[in-house]
Amino acid sequence: MSRAIAALIALTLLGTAVYAEVLMENTAIVTVESPEKAVFHAFVLFPDGFRHAGKYEVAGKKSLALYLGSAKSAWMNEYRKNGRLSQPLILLVAVSEKGVDVKGVNLDWDDLRSEEVKLKFREDEKVKKAISKLEQPQPLSSDLYWAIEDYYEYTLHVVLSYVKPDSSTWGVMDFFYGRYLKVGFAVNTFINSWSVAGYNIIQKRNDKGVTGPFDVGDDCYIWMNVRYRYEKWVYYLDDDPILTMEHVYVKDFYPETITAGTSKPTNARLVPVDSWSYIGSYTARSSTYPYYLFNVFDLTTDHLAIDCLKFIDALVLAGKISGRAATAAGAIGLFVDVDFEYDNVVAFDIDLALYSYPGTTHTVYMAESEAVKSVPAVYFEVH
């Protein structure tokens, strides 16, 4: 009997050790530093959208352990079924008497390292007015919670790259996505202004490349299907709505739909361009050798812009997005910031070659867009 008991104890200890190891492997340690006493809520991205993961109080510095095992299991199942995997994304939404701050924490399933986040509350009269509804003298101990009120998804063609040549230029533009490579799509968040709250870093099982040749007088577009998601969250105090938070982000992209053509799809639009950067003037030496060559490594950043205002239009038509959020998006020319380099590997290979008649000189420009931040759009004009 004693041997049986000893064996049972040994198995129990072994099981406990294995469980503890699994728990550690799937737990992220996030240290939050706040200049104000605040309540912050954690949200974790799942395949079907963000889910509330916990409510915490902080005054100064606080470390918290977030178990991501259920999210990881959901994502691995999604990858097996549909070939889509997102790396862990945690949104921290903090509310103090001074204002609100939203911070995104991007991690990696292979290394759930610890992260530090410093909150910085933006003073805003509308936000402060909403916060002032909280009861005194201890508003942060009241019954505060976030609830998702609405969501909407829509798939659209998105222009990835574009060239408008002059009257004597022809050429070819290539675009390629490598399978399993990570692409981060910014999560645009609106409370009283638009901000970027982390990136949805997606990997796909499919790869696809396309070559788009164009003749003199023809434009060239390369586009892809992208699925957008909208979420509306409301912050309640004892069932009284205090604040509204709206997210617009890319839920999925479909490399197999990458297509080239001399005209864009009717439901696609270009990112609003704020300026055209001068690339240079070039004289063609031969009609069989390009006078200008571009490769993705010529960019000074690993970010590019894709449109999301067409999705905003769809949200307006569906009666989903708030008027304030839609108006603000249009005013700044909101786009989705795409980060295409992770682990020192670029997910997109983009090439452009321009040809013309010997002796002709051409000036090349590239687009720059600015909303929450300044990001290039892979659009070219030739004059």
Image (cartoon, helix red, strand yellow):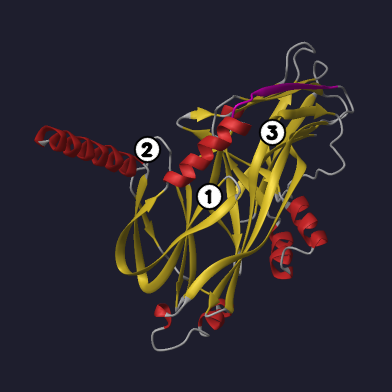
* Residue 332 in view (yes/no): yes
- Mark 3 neighbour density, 10 Å: few (under 14) some (14–19) many (20 or more): some
Q: Which residue is drawn at 45% across and 31% down?
A: 343
Residues at marks 3 and 2 touching, judged by CB atoms closer than 8 Å: no
User: Which amino acid type is shown beneath numbered disc 2?
Assistant: Asp
Which numbered dot is residue 111? 2
- Mark 1 neighbour density, 10 Å: few (under 14) some (14–19) many (20 or more): many
Task: Point out the stretch of residues depicted in magenta.
Answer: 204-214
Is 206 within the magenta? yes
Local SS, label 3: strand
- Mark 2 neighbour density, 10 Å: few (under 14) some (14–19) many (20 or more): few
Where is the C terminus found, in terms of image quarters?
top right
Badge 3 or badge 1: first in the primary sequence: 1
Q: Residue at x 80, y 45 (%)?
A: 269
Of residues 220 and 92, the one nearer the viewer is: 92
Give the percent coordinates (x, y) of residue 65. 34, 54
Whole-Å distance between the Cαs marked 3 and 2?
A: 26 Å
Prevailing secondary structure class for the magenta stretch in the rendered image: strand
Q: Which residue is drawn at 56% across and 54% down?
A: 50
Badge 2 or badge 1: first in the primary sequence: 1
Where is the N terminus found, in terms of image quarters?
top left
**Vertical comparison of 141 with 254: above or below:** below
User: Which amino acid type is shown beneath numbered disc 3?
Assistant: Tyr
Viewer-nearest of discs 2 and 1: 1
Is 244 within the magenta? no
The residue where tag 3 is placed is: 254
Give the percent coordinates (x, y) of residue 42. 45, 59
The residue where tag 1 is placed is: 45
